Image (spheres, rainbow, N blue to C red):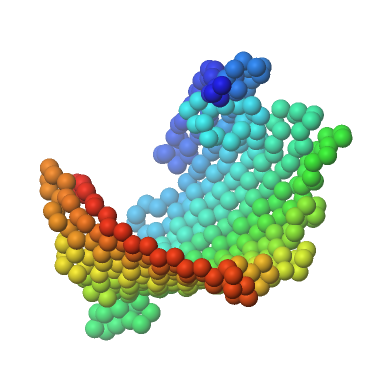
Amino acid sequence: GEDAAPKGSGGALIADTLWYADRLRVRGEYAFSDMDLDGDDLLTKEDARAGSFSLDYELIRDDGQAETPLSLKIGGKYEKIDTYFYSLANTGLAADRDGYSLFANMYWGSLSLNGYGSMVQNNTDDNPDIATDRVLTAGIDGSYSFQPQVTETGELGWMGTPYIGFGTNFVGADRDKTPAGYVGDDTDNQTANIYANLGTSYERWNWQAGYTHSFFEDDANVSSDTVNEMVDLSAYWNATDQITFSAGTQFNRYIEKTNSERSYNITGNFGAQAYIIPDTLNARLDYNMNLSSGSGDIPDRHLVTSEMEWTLIPAGTNSAGVAIAFRGAMEKEYGNSDNSLDEAAYEGFFVLKFKAPLAY
């Protein structure tokens, strides 16, 4: 027979209030559910609860009077959701967690800093057959936008309008309680990454570069320790009012320590779009590549796609537009040391489009 949907009842109560000239926000939520999760009454209905309490406070509020705006908000939240709680309003809500979280957000002129941390534990119903794990998270990220570099003639200088971004985060999971006779894997691992990026923009073009370093360490020896490094570079150029170009590349190095395996990957893309006859004829061309080497080598891949579109009838206020387009693609794979994996594919087809008018 068909799978039955969960059924049951539930309710919620929310209290939300502001104090001290709206600088302090206090919010509390309580909900309950009485659900038949399999929908067939084969399993006992689960009576569950969920609740949360949070405080947000604007420690420093921007009054609009300072030359350099400054604001600082801090907050915290406690949340507990029973193992078998089911939200009728939010079916994607993750259940079975009990934990705390803290945050702080600061904005000072063009500088922004955001920090956060949390501790969450599962098995809120203290089921003796379920392992209880604890997950700690912490992180900080920020960005800074510099003032435009303007020359004496009023034009943007060679540095344009630069900006930087940076951040780091950490996730650690460990076992708090292990049931007697438990045969599952242990939990004791850490994941962390650090990233930085910089870029600048000009009147008609911009570029950005970034670097990310991440690692995973499993002290329980369930999975292999890994290290991943990535460098990326991208640019966009609005050559004229009718022609634009974009390009980007990314280099990735992945190390699996258990088997001493290393793999390398380079991806690249290039795109061009032209409005040959404005509102009538336009075309685009895109190229993507994926080159791999090292352990577990996979075939290199090259893909070219293109489209040319001719608008036969422009969309009107109360009528749809009509356009015809030709699309083409070419894909090639090279097996490197294994020529039997070399493949090539080509395709092309016409498309009839009906366009709805834009409304603002």
- Residue 333 in the figure: left or right of residue 355: right
Judge whether 236 appears above or below 175 on screen. below
Judge whether 283 appears above or below 93 on screen. below
Toward the viewer: 184 or 127? Answer: 184
What residue sits 79% from the left and 41% below the top? 184
Where residue 64 sits: x, y (%)? 34, 54
What residue sits 40% from the left and 65% below the top? 346
Is residue 42 visible to the viewer in this orientation of the structure? yes
Q: Residue furthest front?
A: 340
Where residue 347 sits: x, y (%)? 37, 62
What residue sits 50% from the left and 31% below the top? 90
Q: Residue furthest bottom?
A: 152
What residue sits 62% from the left and 72% below the top? 338
Toward the viewer: 319 or 335? Answer: 335
Where residue 148 sits: x, y (%)? 34, 73
- Residue 240 in the figure: left or right of residue 74: left
Instruction: Name the quadrant containing residue 45.
Output: top right
